[in-house]
Amino acid sequence: MNSASTELEALAAEVHGCLKCPRLVAWRETQAADPPKRYRGQDYWARPVSGFGDPEARILIVGLAPAAHGANRTGRMFTGDRSGDWLYAALHRAGLANQPTAISRDDGLRLYDAYIAAVVRCAPPANKPTPEERDNCLPYLERELEILGRVRVVVALGKFGWDGFLKAAAMIGVPTPRPKPAFGHGAEATLDDRLTLLGMFHPSQQNTFTGKLTVPMTDAVLERAKELAGLRTF
């Protein structure tokens, strides 16, 4: 096991035991105790969710937070919900995942040259963490950025992911443009000689069902990420 793998495992253990935000602790456990009918009888993770993927990744994907009945249930980022269905299918098409589906932590899914994290690690009510909850969680993202030394491209899913990443990057001394670059689908910002930030609309049902985010739009951002990271593109 290489150094990055060891450090990420240690960080994951710390994340899993986090109790910094009482509101989020109560919410994630309440959702697990009274799930929708389709999930009744399942053993919910109901803890903070650590990052997932290749320790040697050159592409980092940053989301908002675990879904109450997605990652809060399965214990793995974007696993077990419609957003994950969309995202992992796209990663598979891009050659960044070995399979297009993500059902559970032991389903055999592996990522190649990609790592998935989030700004907030507990499921928040209405998908809206408070600024204090965001700031409590940001040190985990900061440390992932420091550990994932090969990352060259960050794909931010939605404005919350974009703003959260820029805040985390600034906290570890990564220079960010002034004025702050605005989020948009396909937006691109060069932070330093190492990192480029790309924007993508979040693959939420609201965006994918309405056509705000389409398959070609998703694929185009991932292909651009691969190009910037020096990976083979199709």
Image (cartoon, grey):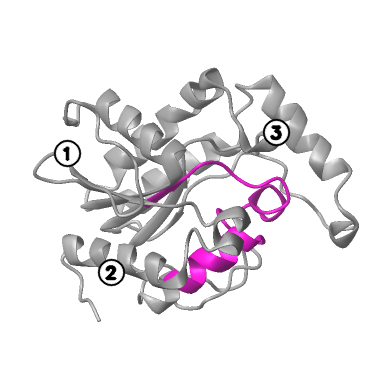
Residue at label 3? 125
- Using the image as rendered, state which of residue 6 and residue 198 is in the foreground: 198
Locate the N terminus and report the quarter of the image it occupies: bottom left
Magenta range is 61-90
Where residue 83 appears, as percent x and y from the top left, is: 58, 59
Q: Residue at x 61, y 54 (%)?
A: 206
Where residue 163 appears, as percent x and y from the top left, is: 37, 33
Q: Residue at x 25, y 81 (%)?
A: 234
Q: Name which of mark 1 and mark 2 comes first in the sequence.
A: 1
Where residue 158 appears, as percent x and y from the top left, is: 44, 45
- Say which quarter of the image contains residue 122: top right
Mark 1: few, some, or many residues within 10 Å (few <14, many ≥20)? some
Can see residue 123?
yes
Q: Which residue is drawn at 49% across and 28% down?
A: 137
Where residue 112 appears, as percent x and y from the top left, is: 35, 69
Mark 2 → mark 3, Cα distance in angstroms: 33 Å
Q: Is residue 86 magenta?
A: yes
Marks 3,1: beta carbons within 8 A: no
Q: What element carries label 2?
A: helix
Q: Which mark is residue 223?
A: 2
Marks 1,2: beta carbons within 8 A: no
Q: Name which of mark 3 and mark 1 comes first in the sequence.
A: 3
Q: What's the residue type where badge 3 is placed?
A: Pro
Q: Name which of mark 2 and mark 3 comes first in the sequence.
A: 3
Q: What element carries label 3?
A: helix
Determine the residue located farthest toward the bottom in the rendered image.
234
